[in-house]
Amino acid sequence: MGTLYVVATPIGNLEDITARALRVLGQVSLIAAEDTRRTSQLLNHFNLTPSALTSYFEHNKLAKLDQVLAALETGDVALVSDGGTPNVSDPGYELVRAALAAGHTVVPIPGASALLAALVASGLPTDSFIYLGFLPRHATHRRQLLASLARERRTLVAYEAPHRLLETLDAVEATLGDRPVAVARELTKVHEEIFRGPASAARAHFASKEILGEVTLVIGGAPAEAAAAWDSARVRAEVAELVAGGVKRKDAARMVADLSGWPQRDVYRLAVEPAETNEE
């Protein structure tokens, strides 16, 4: 019975690969790679020639399960992503579960991780945090998710596409307030940048430049007084602003309830009262 090795690879700087990772990649009978071209470049750089290399990415991961499991019956397999630690917002979860169910040993080979690199350099609390993965692409869904975390005291960490960063920073400020954030891009690479400051300052900074590279966003948790000062006027105003932006009233009421700590039914009642009053 072979072993499945979950191998972390560099997110940019090739010096970040570990000696153990290189040894495993040179010894396994098969490497399942998210992008075989990128993995081949890494292997060539370190003069490694794998016995076999196969693609394993988001759109073929289920079709490739049988092939990888068959390889595990006769030898060891390494799972790698484009960069960083596999199975953290990358393909791998289904393969790990299937390998365990088939009785194989699964061994992690720790290493680079954009999530942890951004967090530890952010200057924000690291003792407890929530990883959100990639934020929703749809603006309303992204805003709803952030609103649901408005009272969360732990640090928030998420991945974001560069072309959505400005919209996301707008959503952070609108739903969470002008929280402290750290925006990390191109980590470990030549043009690495980590901006630290309020969400509004981060937006102003990145609005004036072309945003390139993968982005990791770290957001400070809710302050102790986050639930304070939510009177009925503010509740009505927040719902009205969301509705004006195209959010359905019921969804807006739920988002504001998450933000304010008010019961959702009370938020909705306040939201519809002015309309009922005008009709009389």
Image (cartoon, helix red, strand yellow):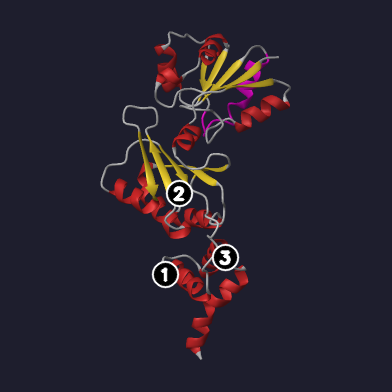
Q: Nearer the viewer, residue 257 or 27?
A: 257
Looking at the rendered structure, the secondary structure element under dot 1 is helix
Residue topped by disc 3: 257
Three-letter amino acid code of the residue under disc 1: Ala
Three-letter amino acid code of the residue under disc 2: Arg
Three-letter amino acid code of the residue under disc 3: Ala
- Residue 238 magenta-highlighted: no
For image coordinates 50% across by 55% down, the residue present is 141
Instruction: Identify the mark at residue 244; answer none if there is no mark.
Output: 1
The quadrant where residue 45 appears: top left
Magenta region: which residues? 57-73
Q: Nearer the viewer, residue 92 or 159?
A: 159
User: What is the crowding at mark 1: few (fewer than 14 residues within 10 Å), some, or many (at least 20)?
Assistant: few
- Residue mark closest to the camera, 3 vs 1: 3
Position of 98 with respect to 89 (left or right) is: right
Instruction: Identify the mark at residue 137; answer none if there is no mark.
Output: 2
Q: Position of residue 73 (x, y in %)?
A: 68, 15
Q: Nearer the viewer, residue 140 or 223?
A: 223
Marks 3 and 1, Cα distance to the nearest angstrom? 17 Å
User: What is the crowding at mark 3: few (fewer than 14 residues within 10 Å), some, or many (at least 20)?
Assistant: many
- Residue 71 magenta-highlighted: yes
Position of 48 with respect to 68 (left or right) is: left
Instruction: Identify the mark at residue 31; answer none if there is no mark.
Output: none
Marks 2 and 3, Cα distance to the nearest angstrom? 23 Å
Marks 2 and 1, Cα distance to the nearest angstrom? 20 Å
In the picture shown, does residue 180 fall above or below 228?
A: above
Q: Position of residue 112 (x, y in %)?
A: 49, 26
